[in-house]
Image (tube, rainbow, N blue to C red):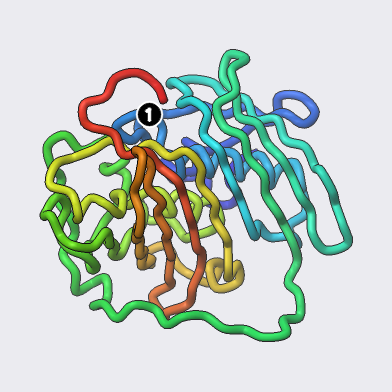
């Protein structure tokens, strides 16, 4: 299975899955999408999500929730994703997935896919007030940036500069792939972990921040599907607590017109740099 009709972009090629045997798909882990300590968590989430979509084979059921636990980073090369439908109800399907490499489990995931329901009440916070993407200067390349930074376009619009010792762990701005691509659930999974970690403005020196677990809630599939190739999304990422080497990060992804597209939460490590070896 490819990622759908948008198969020409580097992201689609790097996250594509192919059937290997019943219930198992293969993919190729690409270091071009790596963070300092291995493959980016959002990148691996997109691979897992593609395999789950292929296993479900029901376009009417959109991704609503995806939770991943990262056990160890896979190396460059082939990975396998084993997917099981744990329950398929009349409106909601629950799936599990295990991404492994050379027989070693790397990512464990659970997801919910569902049709739309008639809501008893709809509500959402207002999007942050920031200048539109075209009025914000993008971050340029900088020495020591991880490979993934060259795959993305970042336009900072929220929070203090990284490593400025600010009083708040808040950061965000407009983001999209450097190679234009219309957003979908896989892109939202990628974007949820693509921005720099929320504590960076509060710190004064770089750290390593590998993800322990990541949950993404997909809030507006129809609004996401209506966006175009050139659209940036507004990402907002904040952290309120760090203790024992762990911090939490809450994220929001907004459309240009102020629709909440996705929410995320992750637990990550805060490690001194440099740090060798796995977690």
Left or right: residue 178 versus residue 68 is: left
Q: Quick check: 206 left or right of 151? A: left
Q: Give the residue at x 36% y 67%.
A: 234
Q: Outermost residue, front direction? A: 244
The answer to whether residue 147 is visible is no
* Up-down relation of residue 127 to residue 137 (above or below): below
Q: Position of residue 34 (x, y in %)?
A: 36, 33
Point out residue 250 in the picture as x, y percentages from the top left corner: 42, 59
| Residue at far top of view | 102
Q: Is residue 248 toward the left or the right of residue 27 in the image?
A: left
Q: Quadrant of residue 116?
A: bottom right
- Is any atom of residue 32 visible in this view? yes
- To which residue does mark 1 refer? 38
Indicate whether 139 appears above or below 37: below
56 relative position to 158: left or right = right
Q: Where 98 falls versus 255 (above or below)?
A: above
Q: Which part of the image, by quadrant, shows the N terminus?
A: top right
- Residue 26 place in picture, x, y as percent: 62, 27
Q: Residue at x 34, y 38 (%)?
A: 245
- Residue 272's place in the image compared with 248, above or below, is above
């Amino acid at each position: 299975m490819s990622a759908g009709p948008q198969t020409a972009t580097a992201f689609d090629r790097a996250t594509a899955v192919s059937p290997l045997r019943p219930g198992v798909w293969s993919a190729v882990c690409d270091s071009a999408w790596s963070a300092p300590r291995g493959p980016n968590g959002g990148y691996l989430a997109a691979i897992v999500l593609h395999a789950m979509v292929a296993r479900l084979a029901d376009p009417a059921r959109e991704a609503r929730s995806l939770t991943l636990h990262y056990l160890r980073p896979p190396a460059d090369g082939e990975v396998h994703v084993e997917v099981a439908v744990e329950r398929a109800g009349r409106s909601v399907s629950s799936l599990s997935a295990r991404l492994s490499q050379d027989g070693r489990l790397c990512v464990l995931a659970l997801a919910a896919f569902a049709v739309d329901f008639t809501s008893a009440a709809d509500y959402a916070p207002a999007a942050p007030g920031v200048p539109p993407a075209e009025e914000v200067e993008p971050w340029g390349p900088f020495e020591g940036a991880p490979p993934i930074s060259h795959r993305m376009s970042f336009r900072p619009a929220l929070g203090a500069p990284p490593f400025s010792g600010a009083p708040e762990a808040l950061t965000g701005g407009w983001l999209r792939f450097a190679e234009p691509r219309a957003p979908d659930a896989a892109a939202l999974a990628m974007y949820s972990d693509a921005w720099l970690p929320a504590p960076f403005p509060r710190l004064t020196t770089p750290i390593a921040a590998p993800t322990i677990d990541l949950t993404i809630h997909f809030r507006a599939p129809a609004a996401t599907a209506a966006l175009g190739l050139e659209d940036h999304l507004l990402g907002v990422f904040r952290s309120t607590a760090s203790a024992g080497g762990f911090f939490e990060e809450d994220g929001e992804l907004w459309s240009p017109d102020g629709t909440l597209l996705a929410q995320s939460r992750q637990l990550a490590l805060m490690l001194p740099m440099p740090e060798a070896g796995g977690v």
